[in-house]
């Protein structure tokens, strides 16, 4: 839906009416020099344009059907010309029949008019294809623009998570505990990890999609902070398939989901828990699974969803439409499982030597 004040593309019937009306006036104007045949020319022009208009209306569903088949250009043109020849010949025959009023038909004029009608309708079909292609490109640009907006919103959402008072309090408290325990190197390392994560979020202009290895690198930085805070209570297992490392994924896809898993599944349990992140390819789809252990009653009541999950669902819908999946499961043994499936597309250069185990 376009915003108020933005130009919108005219509807089909407005273009149809404007185009054929313009052609009618142009042909009519060309007949003005033949003043002695003005009445006949007006009648023939009106009749011809009216029948051509009806012919184009018949061709519209055929053109839409051909476009939906995504045929090669040559096959598309051949089939289009065949239909235009059939309808053009019928239009020329009807015009000729109505002009001579069932008298002797002029076969020379009939062949000439059939060819003229076929060429005109073929031109109309190609114009229809061009407009549809232009509309598709415009919709694609709009979709990408909306995706970029969602990516910026995701970056801000991630900042809200990272600057969350609870998160900062726990992180700084962990740093303080390390200092009091005399483990200054660990405290210094954790401060550097926090600063590094915030610096990336603040300074880096994130695109709407990034390679999976880049998204995993950012997520591992976040996990390093949480592991410094939780220690052995947080166990992480990363099983990222090598063939998925350069797959395009929405930026800031994993961090909000991982934070939810730690906050609701691992941190509340005295003995801690584990988080597993897996990726694989299945029928040209990239599958990402995030599993965390946790209490059996961790499933939220009702339909209330966190900011991270809602943001992720909105961005997946904007980027991929119906060609994606986002499912949540709560196993009987406890914890939560998040399944994401998106179309597999390569993005960026693969980083050789990428470690897939944490």
Image (cartoon, helix red, strand yellow):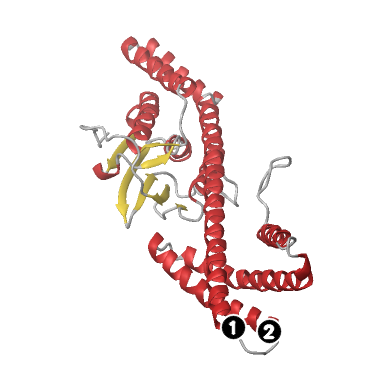
Q: Nearer the viewer, residue 228 or 109?
A: 109
Specify the quadrant of the image occupied by residue 262: top left
**Could you say which disc has been placed on residue 21 in the image?**
none
Q: Nearer the viewer, residue 204 or 69?
A: 69
Residue 5 relative to residue 92: left or right:
right
Work out whether 119 lies above or below 291: below
Q: Residue at x 65, y 78 (%)?
A: 95
Work out whether 244 lies above or below 49: above
Q: Nearer the viewer, residue 59 or 180?
A: 59
Q: Residue at x 38, y 15 (%)?
A: 192
Specify the quadrant of the image occupied by residue 177: top left
Kind of element beneath mark 2: helix
Q: Nearer the viewer, residue 99 or 222?
A: 99
Q: Quadrant of the image for the C terminus?
A: top left
Residue 287 % position (x, y) = 36, 50
Residue 189 % position (x, y) = 34, 15
Residue 116 % position (x, y) = 56, 69
Residue 56 % position (x, y) = 61, 69
Label 2 – label 1 distance at C-alpha:
9 Å
Kind of element beneath mark 1: loop
Q: Residue at x 58, y 77 (%)?
A: 109
Q: Which residue is mark 1?
A: 106
Q: Which residue is mark 2?
A: 100
Mark 2–mark 1 CB contact (< 8 Å): yes
Residue density around tag 2, few if under 14, some if 14–19, many if 20 or more, within 10 Å: few
Residue density around tag 1, few if under 14, some if 14–19, many if 20 or more, within 10 Å: few
């Amino acid at each position: 839906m376009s915003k108020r004040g933005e130009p919108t593309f005219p509807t089909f019937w407005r273009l149809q009416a404007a185009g054929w009306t313009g052609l009618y006036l142009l042909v009519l104007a060309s007949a003005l020099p033949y003043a002695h045949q003005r009445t006949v020319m007006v009648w023939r022009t009106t009749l011809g344009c009216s029948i051509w208009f009806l012919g184009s209306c018949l061709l519209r569903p055929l053109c839409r059907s051909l476009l939906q088949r995504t045929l090669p250009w040559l096959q598309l043109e051949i089939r289009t010309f065949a239909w235009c020849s059939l309808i053009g010949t019928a239009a020329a025959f009807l015009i000729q029949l109505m002009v001579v009023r069932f008298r002797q038909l002029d076969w020379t004029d009939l062949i000439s008019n059939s060819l003229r009608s076929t060429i005109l309708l073929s031109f109309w079909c190609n114009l229809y294809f061009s407009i549809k292609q232009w509309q598709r490109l415009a919709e694609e640009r709009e979709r990408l623009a909306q995706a970029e907006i969602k990516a910026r919103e995701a970056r801000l959402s991630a900042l809200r998570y990272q600057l969350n008072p609870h998160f900062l309090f726990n992180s700084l408290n962990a740093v303080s505990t390390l200092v009091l325990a005399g483990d200054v190197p660990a405290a210094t390392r954790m401060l550097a990890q926090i600063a590094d994560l915030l610096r990336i979020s603040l300074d880096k202009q994130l695109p709407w999609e990034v390679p999976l290895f880049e998204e995993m690198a950012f997520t591992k930085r976040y996990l390093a902070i949480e592991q410094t805070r939780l220690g052995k209570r947080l166990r992480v297992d990363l099983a990222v398939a090598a063939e998925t490392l350069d797959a395009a994924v929405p930026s800031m896809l994993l961090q909000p989901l991982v934070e939810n898993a730690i906050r609701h599944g691992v941190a509340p349990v005295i003995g801690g828990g584990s988080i597993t992140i897996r990726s694989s390819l299945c029928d040209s789809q990239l599958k990402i699974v995030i599993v965390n252990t946790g209490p059996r009653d961790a499933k939220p009541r009702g339909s209330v969803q966190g900011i991270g999950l809602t943001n992720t669902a909105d961005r997946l819908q904007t980027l991929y439409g119906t060609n994606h999946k986002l499912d949540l499961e709560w196993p009987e043994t406890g914890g939560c499982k998040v399944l994401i499936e998106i179309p597999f597309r390569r993005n960026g250069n693969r980083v050789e030597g990428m470690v897939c185990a944490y």
